Image (tube, rainbow, N blue to C red):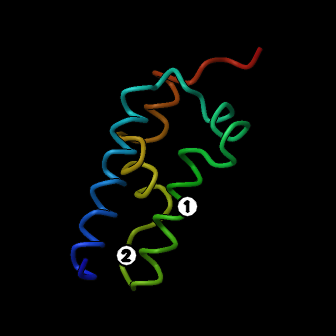
Amino acid sequence: MSEQQAMALDAAAFRRLLKHLDENKQVQNIDLMNLAGFCRNCLAKWYAAEAQAQNLDIDYEQARERVYGMPYAEWKDKHQTPLA
C-alpha cells in the first residue's frame, strides 16, 4: 500500500468514526472517556493540534465543530444530558 493510499484509508476511517459518533449522540462524552479513554473533545484537540503542526489556521472551536458536526454549544443544548 502506498503512503497516499494509507492516508486515504486513515481519512475515510476518521470520517466513518465521526459519522458513527454523530449517529449515536446518546453516547455521552463521559461514557466515551470512562470506556475508551477519549471523547469527542479529545478528537477535536487532536485535530486542532495536527492542524497547527501543519501550519493550518484551525483552532479548537473550529475543530470541535468538525467533530460535533455543528457548533459545540448547539450540540450541547440539543444532545448533552444533564448530570444526575
Residue type of the residue flagged with mark 2? Asp
The kind of secondary structure element at disc 1 is helix
The residue most toward the front is 1
- Where does label 2 land, which residue? 57
The location of residue 14, given as percent across then percent down, is: 36, 54
Which quadrant holds residue 11? bottom left
- Where does label 1 land, which residue? 45
The residue most toward the right is 84
Mark drawn on residue 64: none
Disc 2 crowd, CA 10 A, few/some/many (<14, 14-19, 20+): few
Q: Is residue 35 left or right of residue 55?
A: right
Query: Which residue is pictured at 66% across the width and 31% down the height?
Result: 31
The location of residue 3, given as percent across then percent down, is: 28, 82
Q: Earlier in the sequence, mark 2 or mark 1?
A: 1
- Nearest to viewer (mark 2 / mark 1): 1
Query: Which residue is pictured at 49% across the width and 36% down the height?
Result: 73
The residue most toward the top is 84
The location of residue 47, given as percent across then percent down, is: 46, 64
Asked if residue 50 is positioned above or below residue 77 in the image, the reply reads: below
The location of residue 10, given as percent across then percent down, is: 34, 64
Q: Are marks 2 and 1 in contact (CB under 8 Å)?
A: no
The kind of secondary structure element at disc 2 is loop
Front in this rendered view, residue 58 or 39: 39
The answer for how far apart the CA atoms under marks 2 and 1 are is 14 Å
User: In which quadrant is the N terminus drawn?
Assistant: bottom left
Residue type of the residue flagged with mark 1? Lys
Query: Which residue is pictured at 39% across the width and 48% down the height?
Result: 65
Query: Which residue is pictured at 46% across the width and 79% down the height?
Result: 52
Asked if residue 59 is positioned above or below residue 28 in the image, the reply reads: below
